[in-house]
Amino acid sequence: MIFNIQRFSTHDGDGIRTIIFYKGCPLRCQWCSNPESQSFGYSVMYDKKSCRGFGDCIKADNRAITRINNNGIQIDREIITGPEKLRDICASKALTISGESKSVDELLTEIEKDSPFYRNNGGVTLSGGEPLSQGEEFITLLQKLKGRNINVNMETSLHVNWKSVARCIGLVGTFLVDLKHIDQDKFKSFVQGDSELVLNNLIKLIDADAQVIVRIPVIPGFNHSEKEIKQMIEFVSSLKNVNEIHFLPYHTFGVEKYKSLGMDYTFGHKKQVQDSELEPYIQFAQSKGLQTKIGG
């Protein structure tokens, strides 16, 4: 299941790229900018500012959706049955459904619309959520893209079992690996995951001669200190055949999405990280022989 297709992107890889965003992620990063990507199923999003009170959504599911006087609606997402029926029901687009099932052939059709723009190293970037958490149809897509000589990059946290990673080796041009932290306790507390799983998968992936670029999201209150980031850079510089590291500064672009999903955003009080704050990290990484970049 996907939740977005972004065309003509110049990020997340060389050239002009088509980015496919998959739903479903094993992690729960507190600063996640795409919270709708966390669930493997449909997500019901509601923008109160756009609501005109037409009431069609209530008629469609009056158990889960109720009116609150003149102040819009209240949604009990836990008891919605068949959220797909709500997809196009709201004329004002205040209520939308994130998530759409597409077959491999349907995705290929969408991708091939952009193929004339893939010259000069462009191609497809698979993102999420976590692409490696997808099923066998995902591997079929990779195989067909390879058969069409379409370059593929993949954004991944590597927080999956090794088998899910290994099946993609040889089918993905570059793995863009998010390295969030190397401290087990912090990783578990802020991300609800296992840092050792990520580090072990990263080492195995590199040992398999895969092309890897490491990306560090710089998050205030989590890893945004010289000590922590330098420890991560030291680790990356020790890896064979990893020559490039990207720094992704924290931003608050996803705040409104949390509201529309009825979720709390615990990082809402944090300030965005400015590019200038990354200069000490960049200088240190370059001193270790790594190429650097800010952003994807």
Image (cartoon, rainbow, N blue to C red):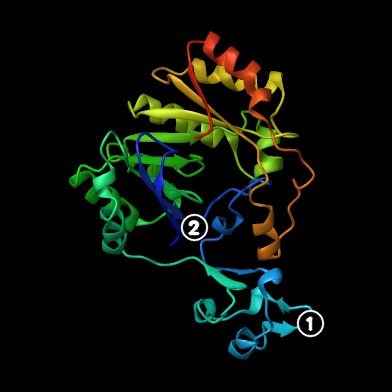
> Residue 68, labelled with which disc?
1
> Residue 21, labelled with which disc?
none
Please state which of residues 252 and 262 is positioned toward the viewer in this rendering: 252
Residue 115 rendering spot, x and y as whole percentages: 25, 48
The residue that label 2 is drawn on is: 23
127 left or right of 141 in image: right
**Amino acid found under the numbered disc labelled 1:** Ile
Residue at image x 48%, y 34%?
Answer: 177
Nearest-to-viewer mark from 2 and 1: 1
* Residue 42 in sight: no
Q: How many marks?
A: 2
Please state which of residues 130 and 74 is positioned toward the viewer in this rendering: 74
Residue 34 rendering spot, x and y as whole percentages: 58, 52
Q: Residues within 10 Å of mark 1 (few under 14, many from 20)?
A: few
Residue 138 rendering spot, x and y as whole percentages: 34, 54
Residue at image x 76%, y 49%?
Answer: 266
* Residue 153 in sight: yes
Q: CA distance from mark 2 to mark 1?
A: 30 Å
Q: Residues within 10 Å of mark 2 (few under 14, many from 20)?
A: many
Secondary structure under badge 2? loop
Residue sticking out furthest to the left? 147
Residue at image x 69%, y 33%?
Answer: 273
Residue 201 rendering spot, x and y as whole percentages: 46, 34
**Amino acid found under the numbered disc labelled 2:** Lys
Dot 2 or dot 1, earlier in sequence? 2
Please state which of residues 181 and 112 is positioned toward the viewer in this rendering: 112
